[in-house]
Amino acid sequence: MNRIDRISAILIQLQSKKVVKGQDIADKFGISLRTVYRDVKTLEEAGVPIIGEPGTGYSIMDGYRLPPVMFTREEATALMTAEKLIEKFTDPTTADVYNSAMMKIKAVLRGDDKSHLETMSDHIEVLGNPYLPEDAGTSIHLQTILKSIAQKTTITIDYFANHSQEFTTRKIEPVGIFFLLGKWYVVAYCWLREDYRSFRIDRISKIVASGQHFQQKHAPLSSFLKDITAQKRELHTVVMEVDKHAMRFIGEQKYYNGYISERDLGERVEMTFLTSSLWGFARWYMMLGDAADITQPTSIKTYITTLAKEILKKTEQ
């Protein structure tokens, strides 16, 4: 990136946040702090009213208005692709808000770029899984949770806990939301448990915004996600050989069971998994039992034999 393009990009970065640290600019463009100081000075000399506070960062003076930012064709196409993802994987309200923002973006595009987007729109689609039910809870609750996060207010939820198969009413202080394996979750401080918990949003049957502000200062969402993904569990390596004709029945289920890799053996496929539950894997394997063999660990065969005997017992009754 040449210096003119970099200075323009720094100006856009300054417009994107209230305060931008000099080190953040240096990290983004791979330059030294000395170079950041020179580039910011160039912007100041060009008439951009930049306020710099030692130890805080740079900001643009309130009230200063710049011409609309022009998007490249590739940037506009990426935003349109994101619009289709948002329509499919968020709630209708969020989709409407994003659609409104996209209309404003399209308004500043050149005529040929607008035509390009209209053409590309017919060539990009996002399809949901037809075998999974619609997440009605997400459609109803996502915006309420986001509003509560922004306003730092508590909400009360009626929640179904899958592990205990129980409904409970919780008062929570939401910290943030995240998307994992096709589902939205909210991380929050739970008054009932007096600790932080993650709740799957589609399992919330009712939600009430209390309007009550909470004073507790919560850590950033990223710190909770780090704890969630770093939870130490004993993992078992499972190697399974599957007849090729049966591979079509596996589909996305392999990812839910710890899929790592696979190797072509000719008429069969060798698949390797890391699972935290040999019992759980054994139950999944029963679906493929006549077309697959587990080569390791041998200990899983005890679980499979036990399950097979229980099934046989039930069918003989």
Image: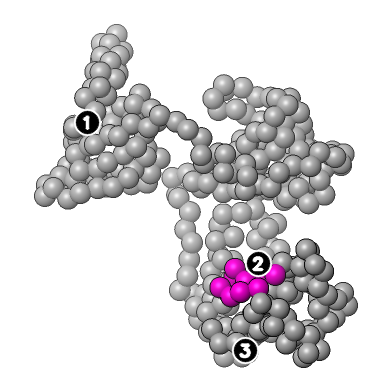
Mark 1 to mark 3 CA distance (whole Å) = 59 Å
Q: Which residues are magenta?
A: 22-33
Asked if residue 181 is positioned above or below residue 82 in the image, the reply reads above
Q: Earlier in the sequence, mark 1 or mark 3?
A: 3
Choose mark 2 or mark 1, whichever is in front: 2
Q: In the figure, is residue 291 to the left or right of 168? A: left
* Residue at the image point whose x is 74% and y is 42% from the top: 218
Q: Which mark is residue 127?
A: none
Counting other residues with Cα less than 10 Å from the Cα at mark 1, is it few (<14), some (14-19), or many (20 or more)? some
Residue, disc 2: 24
Residue, disc 1: 296
Q: Earlier in the sequence, mark 3 or mark 2?
A: 3
Residue, disc 3: 4
Counting other residues with Cα less than 10 Å from the Cα at mark 2, is it few (<14), some (14-19), or many (20 or more)? some
Depth check: 170 or 219 in front? 219
Depth check: 286 or 260 in front? 260
Asked if residue 273 is positioned above or below residue 47 in the image, the reply reads above
Residue reaching furthest front? 34
Where residue 201 appears, as percent x and y from the top left, is 63, 40
